[in-house]
């Protein structure tokens, strides 16, 4: 039995560039666009997080619905509504057969801090029962399932930077195995000071004194389905996954897992490296990660140089960042969206050109602290 | 067609620091639920939990040296993984091998991070370094285990609350059956912490006494902690090296009830879908099932909804299908629970003995199941289910069978 083709049918996004995919692509295409950074924290200066400052669920979610959702669930619900709206009403599939696969780095942390604030500053007995269910990382995906009455598998993957890519890959697996007829593959992260402070203490956040990453807030949704379904935007042609040894807060020393994940994704998609037209880079501003990617891509492509773009240096890093990169790739291979902004400096230096022409196949590599690597290949339908 | 065999089991629970101690005491009907000493519970409304006995728990010899920031949850996972590898007859080494690791992600290093959060919220002095925040990400135990044992294949951390490690086992078996890897380590690890203890208490979901699953007197769950790691191996790979399997992963089902964040759909119709999806995936009939390791949290709402689902699937035959819950003995180990219960189910199949429901004494008409009171009993479950139903309606059911 041959594997079914898996299509990206629609997309939705909420990011530091605002609500909606169109606004996101416009912002990225504007070289002058930069998000306003900053998240407040107790008794200390703000930290660089690309938060969704203008986000309001009011235009999309009824107030009574929005009120019962915490912020990451709202972000995801609004992004999902954008994607679902494009699929027609009723949906082409029974909702009982529609799943959700989400990746997150930190969803639930703000709720967690609220519960712990009560525990430590008032009394454990004052822990807010309404907040506690939102402390689980799967709350946004579960709330989405409840809101949209989606009864298929509802999975969340917590894998730091590669959570969003993992969600897309596992959504593909669910469909290939027939466990669902359609799946909303998502990434979602919230702006919270605990996560940001952790990386600040590690010295990996961007400051005026040294390069580094900014953290992302937002949600991205790709609706995946085999046939039948509305006209596809792209094909999820392949995915790969491997890992290398590293402490949870460190990248591995060796690009081997990233190379292995990319090779698996290409093999599964039936493409040779020379057929890749675009790399949507994982560069997030951390020099050691940029070096790992540059070495991995050189090992993968030899002297060949596909076009490259990056998004995480501006939109921020997180599980949502991977899903946003997959979303950008979808629109590049599917509708020829212009991605003609400069590639990350590390790839420019290695000879990877900007994406100035339409492409048919895109590679989206990902590598998390701790050493887990995931790669996707998206192609034109 | 490839088969996924369980060839090694590592267990660490409140009943014991290893598989055999846990199994022996579980069959004896003992409970590990006792006064919680991990942190001060004087401000909480309940004071019991199934805490791992720190006096009995020692990390076994490992091919890595855990550092001072290695969390309690990661230490549990490392110990269970080492025991599982040794049990399977596989090298307990850091030698690189293209095997998968699929774990349920729980609180990870939250217990340790809570000290940092308390200091920060109280305006305490700021200190440098990552310190107690190293293992805040939920996949930290996965990172520790993979690094320690040289696992270079896919590393997946599923976090669907209480069904996390059930689904992890299902995904691991799928990776093996799809030919992605010959071996996968899977299961989960979770540690008690103030957040979950306060949170479940705030929901009034914790029994001030010990949990009594399926019992008329039940008043809620008891929280627990621990870890299970199962070696899931492609059958031919296992045969070639003469491994002795406990059981085979026949399939799994995963659905969402799309009903409520904390309350189960009461008629059981949603969980019925999960069970039927699992049976269909496994290619077995409901009439083949001879034992169910239930979710059995002992909350007022969960147990009747769960039994209603089984009644929908098995009808009158349910009376002859024993359904037991280990949560009266091991507590609800949250994201590790499904892995622990899958391990117990595999042991039940291999050793033709069914574990009891500790704490169960008085039947509840709303839970019309044979809950195996008292001690374990002989049974031959050639096909058995291990069920988990979680916050957010995320349900997972594993179908395990004998390899004979």
Image: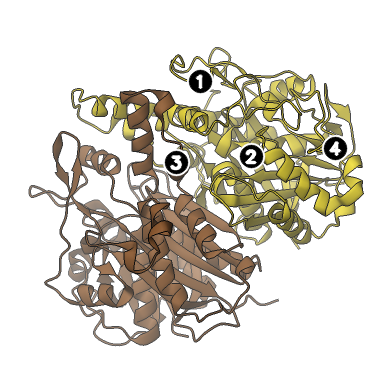
Q: Label 1 vs label 3: CA separation?
A: 18 Å
Determine the image quadrant of residue B378: top right
Residue indicated by mark 1: B45
| Circle nearer the N terminus (4, 1) | 1
Alpha carbon distance from label 3 to label 4: 36 Å
**Gap in angstroms between the C-alphas marked 3 and 2:** 28 Å
Q: Colour of chain A?
A: brown
Mark 4 lies on residue = B322
Q: Label 2: chain?
A: B
Q: Nearer the viewer, mark 1 or mark 2?
A: 1
* Mark 4 element type: loop
In the picture, one chain is yellow; tell me its letter.
B
Residue at the location (67% across, 35% down)? Answer: B300
Left or right: where A135 falls relative to B357: left
Residues indicated by labels 1 and 2 sit on the same polypeptide chain: yes
Tell me the crowding category of disc 3: few under 14, some 14 to 19, or many 20 or more residues within 10 angstroms, Cα based.
some
Position of B279 relative to B96 (above/below): below
Mark 4–mark 1 distance (CA, rounded to whole Å)? 34 Å
Which residue is depicted at the point 20% across and 29% down? B128
Label 4 vs label 1, nearer the camera: 1
**x then y, percent, for residue B227:** 58, 32
Quadrant of the image occupied by residue B214: top right
As measured in the structure, the alpha-carbon distance from the residue carrying label 1 to the one carrying label 2 is: 29 Å
Disc on res. B339: 2
Q: Residue furthest top?
A: B55
Chain letter for the residue marked with disc 4 in the picture: B
Residue A130, which numbered label? 3
User: Residue A214: x percent and y percent?
Assistant: 22, 53
Q: Contact (CB < 8 A) between labels 4 and 1?
A: no
Q: Nearer the viewer, residue B185 or A229?
A: A229
Give neighbour class at mark 4: few <14, some 14-19, many 20+ (Cα, 10 Å). Answer: many
């Amino acid at each position: 039995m041959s594997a079914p083709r898996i299509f990206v049918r629609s997309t939705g996004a909420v990011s530091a560039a605002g609500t909606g995919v169109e606004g996101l692509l416009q912002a990225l295409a504007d070289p002058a666009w930069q998000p306003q950074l900053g998240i407040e924290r107790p008794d200390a200066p703000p930290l660089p997080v690309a938060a969704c400052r203008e986000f309001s669920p009011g235009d999309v979610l009824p107030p009574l619905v929005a009120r019962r959702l915490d912020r990451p669930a709202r972000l995801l619900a609004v992004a999902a509504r954008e994607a679902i709206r494009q699929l027609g009403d009723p949906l082409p599939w029974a909702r009982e057969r529609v799943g959700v696969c989400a990746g997150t780095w930190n969803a639930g942390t703000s709720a967690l801090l609220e519960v712990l604030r009560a525990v430590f500053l008032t009394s454990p007995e004052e822990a807010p029962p309404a907040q506690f269910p939102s402390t689980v990382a799967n709350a946004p995906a579960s709330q989405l399932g409840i809101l949209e009455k989606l009864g298929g598998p509802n999975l969340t993957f917590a894998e730091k930077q590669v959570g969003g890519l993992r969600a897309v890959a596992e959504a593909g697996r669910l469909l290939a195995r027939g466990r669902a007829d359609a799946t909303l593959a998502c990434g979602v992260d919230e702006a919270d000071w605990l996560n940001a402070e952790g990386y600040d203490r590690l010295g990996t956040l961007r400051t005026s004194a040294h390069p580094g990453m900014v953290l992302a807030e937002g949600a991205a949704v790709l609706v995946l389905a085999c046939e039948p379904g509305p006209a596809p935007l792209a094909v999820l042609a392949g995915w790969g996954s491997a890992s290398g040894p590293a402490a949870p807060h460190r990248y591995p020393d060796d690009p081997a897992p990233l190379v292995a994940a990319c090779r698996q994704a290409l093999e599964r998609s039936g493409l040779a490296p020379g057929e890749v037209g675009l790399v949507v880079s994982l560069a997030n501003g951390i020099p050691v990660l940029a070096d790992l990617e540059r070495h991995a891509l050189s090992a993968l492509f030899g002297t060949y140089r596909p076009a490259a773009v990056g998004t995480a240096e501006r939109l921020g890093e997180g599980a949502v960042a991977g899903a946003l990169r997959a979303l950008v790739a979808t629109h590049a291979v599917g509708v020829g969206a212009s991605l003609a902004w400069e590639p990350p400096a590390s790839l420019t230096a290695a000879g990877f050109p900007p994406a100035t022409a339409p492409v048919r196949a895109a590679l989206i590599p990902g590598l998390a602290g701790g050493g887990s690597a995931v790669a996707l290949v998206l192609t034109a339908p | 067609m490839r088969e996924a065999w369980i060839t090694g089991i590592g267990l660490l629970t409140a009943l014991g620091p290893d598989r055999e101690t846990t199994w022996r005491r579980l069959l004896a009907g003992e409970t590990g639920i006792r006064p919680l000493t991990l942190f001060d519970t004087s401000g909480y409304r309940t004071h019991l939990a199934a805490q791992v006995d720190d006096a009995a728990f020692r990390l076994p010899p490992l091919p890595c040296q855990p550092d001072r920031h290695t969390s309690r949850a990661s230490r549990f996972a490392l110990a269970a993984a080492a025991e599982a590898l040794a049990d399977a007859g596989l090298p307990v080494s850091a030698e690189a091998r293209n095997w998968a690791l699929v774990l349920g992600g729980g609180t990870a290093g939250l217990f340790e991070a809570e000290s940092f959060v308390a200091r920060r919220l109280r305006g305490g002095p700021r200190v440098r370094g990552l310190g107690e925040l190293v293992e805040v990400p939920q996949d930290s135990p996965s990172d520790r285990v993979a690094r320690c044992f040289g696992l270079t294949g896919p590393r997946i951390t599923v976090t669907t609350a209480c069904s996390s490690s059930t689904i992890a086992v299902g995904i691991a078996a799928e990776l093996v059956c799809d030919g992605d890897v010959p071996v996968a380590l899977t299961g989960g690890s979770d540690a008690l912490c103030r957040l979950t203890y306060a949170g479940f208490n705030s929901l009034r979901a914790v029994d001030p006494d010990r949990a009594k699953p399926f019992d008329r007197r039940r008043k809620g769950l008891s929280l627990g902690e621990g870890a299970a790691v199962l070696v899931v191996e492609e059958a031919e790979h296992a045969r070639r090296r003469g491994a002795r399997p406990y059981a085979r992963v026949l399939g799994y089902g995963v659905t969402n009830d799309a009903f409520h964040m904390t309350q189960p759909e009461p008629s059981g119709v949603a969980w019925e879908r999960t069970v039927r999806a699992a049976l269909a995936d496994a290619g077995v009939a409901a009439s083949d099932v001879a034992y169910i390791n239930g979710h059995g949290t002992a909350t007022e709402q969960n147990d009747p909804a769960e039994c209603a689902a089984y009644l929908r699937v098995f009808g009158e035959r349910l009376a002859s299908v024993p359904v037991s819950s280990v949560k009266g003995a091991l507590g609800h180990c949250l994201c590790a629970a499904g892995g622990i219960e899958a391990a117990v189910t595999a042991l039940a199949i291999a050793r033709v003995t069914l574990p009891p429901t500790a704490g169960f004494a008085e039947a509840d008409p709303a839970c019309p199941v044979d809950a195996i009171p008292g001690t374990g009993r002989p049974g031959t479950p050639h096909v058995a289910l291990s069920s988990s139903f979680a916050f957010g309606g995320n349900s997972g059911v594993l179908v395990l069978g004998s390899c004979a």
